[in-house]
Image (cartoon, coloured by chain):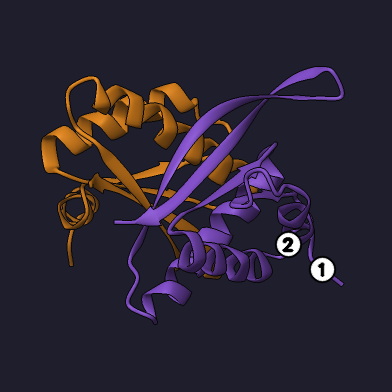
Chain colours: A purple, B orange
Amino acid sequence: MLSYAENEADEHTASPEVLKVSARSRPSAVAGAIAGVVRELGRAEIQAIGAGATNQAVKAVAIARDYLRETGIEVVCLPEFIDITIDNEDRTAMLLVVEPR
Amino acid sequence: MLSYAENEADEHTASPEVLKVSARSRPSAVAGAIAGVVRELGRAEIQAIGAGATNQAVKAVAIARDYLRETGIEVVCLPEFIDITIDNEDRTAMLLVVEPR
């Protein structure tokens, strides 16, 4: 069974690199997805809404940095706020852009 | 044996740039501190324990990136896990290193 992040990534073929992370996402699984997307596309974007999700996303980036460093890729994280609409409700999410330094 | 004041001074000198963020920290205030430390010392380190604190820390970094970009400094964030001891208890904290790209 796919993790939440992997499942979401598959559903959003328009922007395949956006990984949606929830408070229940497993950081190591998301980290694997981040590393794969960075290797495939050169960068990854992780979207998180709320403290629990943002925490899991940051943990995942920390782990992904280790994964990628093992293959000689040094990545950095660029956090920014984004406005999104879910069920006709405006929300502010965190977007963590991960790309080579 | 060092006096309390000397001991504190030593700790401060050892890593003057570590900003400790809690779940109750105001992101914009922390962002101002991050921007100031980066301008002064070239880099800043933000320590957070727990989801609420990490969330505030990431928000602060996003805001600090805007502050610093206004003065021509493009910073990136390097999240990593660190092991710390508080009240004789081992904890895992997130350390967000912020430095120019």
Q: Is residue B8 visible?
A: yes
Q: Secondary structure at mark 2?
A: helix
Do callouts 1 and 2 mark residues in contact (Cβ within 8 Å)?
yes
Looking at the picture, how far across and down is residue B54, in whole percent? 54, 46
Residues B49 and A12: in front is A12
Residue at the far bottom: name it. Answer: A70
Q: CA distance from mark 1 to mark 2?
A: 6 Å
Q: Position of residue B16 (x, y in %)?
A: 21, 47
> Measured along the vertical axis of the image, is residue A65 above or below residue B16?
below
Residue designated by label 1: A2
x and y, in percent, of residue B99 in the image: 24, 47
Residue at x 51%, y 44% (from the top left corner):
A96
Residue A9, quarter of picture: bottom right
The residue that disc 2 covers is A6
Taking depth in this image into account, of A23 and B4 the one nearest to the observer is: A23
Side of B40 where A22 appears, left or right: right
* Residue A66, placed above or below residue A88: below
Is residue B87 at least partly visible in the picture? no
* Mark 1 burial class by Cα count in 10 Å: few <14, some 14-19, many 20+: few
